[in-house]
Amino acid sequence: MTDPRGRFSLDAFRHEALSEIGSTNSECLARARAGDSGLLWITAGRQLTGRGRRGRAWTSEPGNLYASLLLIDPAPAERIASLPLAVAVAAHAAIRSVLPPGGEPLEVKWPNDILIGRKKTCGILLEGEALPDGHRALVIGIGINIRHMPDDAPYGVTRLADHGAGASPDEVFAHLFREMADVLDAWDKGWGTAEISRRWRKVACGIGEKITVNLTDRSLVGTFTGIDDRGFLMLDTGEGAPMPIAAGDVFFERTD
């Protein structure tokens, strides 16, 4: 059940497991158009047309986790910016649950890439759509490299199997299902942004380091000083106050 502030209990969420589908995100959006009330997880053993940010393909062979969560009217527009941080906190906690202790650092790269040893193992894609009835659908798509990883990525990638994790996609999803309910409850339709930001900073990658941020029209270089109360990246370029950045691709300075 939910209350007016948007607090969730674990049993409010539903799950439908499919063996194969084009895209779990697309399926969730189709369900929303058909009138689904939300809090619906769709998982698939294999995706035929999986995608990442900016239309990039996402490797979708059996053995990895492909999951999407449909939310309807998740928060007022002015409070939605912190949701990617909340999702990253939940995905990080789920992956941490299946990794043996003592391995390479498990961190979150702004806003919501999950890295092991500075290599990406989980991608998150949020997509929204206005519905004919006036409500808004938002889909949280999560792909976790468990057994497979792309061999043509423009950045470092890894998979859980390379770090001693023997969990199946179903086991990883069970952790994600529980952690996402807990984090969305804390996020509280954006009213809990301060708590989410606190959790995010504890697992953040690269605060205090020099980074490059690629925007749609230019690249910026500076020091990553953290996030503001909206979840925006704060970049100190040395030219006045740190600059808030709402969206962009972050690259760390090589140290080798």
Image (spheres, rainbow, N blue to C red):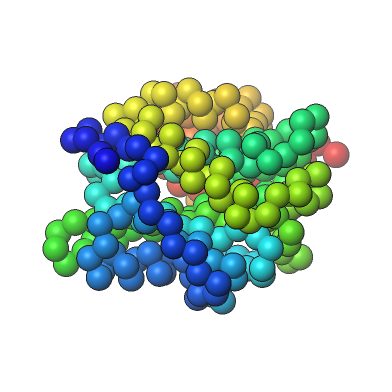
Q: Quadrant of the C terminus?
A: top right
Residue beneath the point at 49% across and 64% down: 17
Left-right relation of 173 to 229: right
Where 205 sits versus 76, above or below? above
Q: Is residue 238 visible?
A: no
| Image spot of residue 230 (x, y percent) | 37, 32
Q: Choose between 54 and 1: the one closer to the eye.
A: 1
Residue 175 appears anywhere in the view: yes
Question: Which percent across, then down, holds residue 181?
Answer: 42, 40
Q: x%, y% of residue 131? A: 21, 64
Q: Given the current orientation, which residue lies at the most extreme left position?
A: 133
Residue lying furthest right: 256
In depth, the one of 33 and 39 nearer the eye is 39
Q: Is residue 119 left or right of residue 242?
A: right
Q: Nearer the viewer, residue 99 or 135?
A: 99
Does 89 sit above or below residue 24?
above
Q: Quadrant of the N terminus?
A: top left
Quadrant of residue 132 within the rendered picture: bottom left
Q: Residue at x 33, y 70 (%)?
A: 30
Left or right? Give the position of 2 relative to 55: left
User: Residue 78: image x %, image y %?
Assistant: 26, 39
Q: Quadrant of residue 255?
A: top right
Q: Is residue 80 left or right of residue 117?
A: left
Residue shown at 65% from the left, 60% from the top: 64
Taking the spot 44% from the left edge, 62% from the top edge, the residue there is 16
* Total numbered labels placed on residues in the image: 0
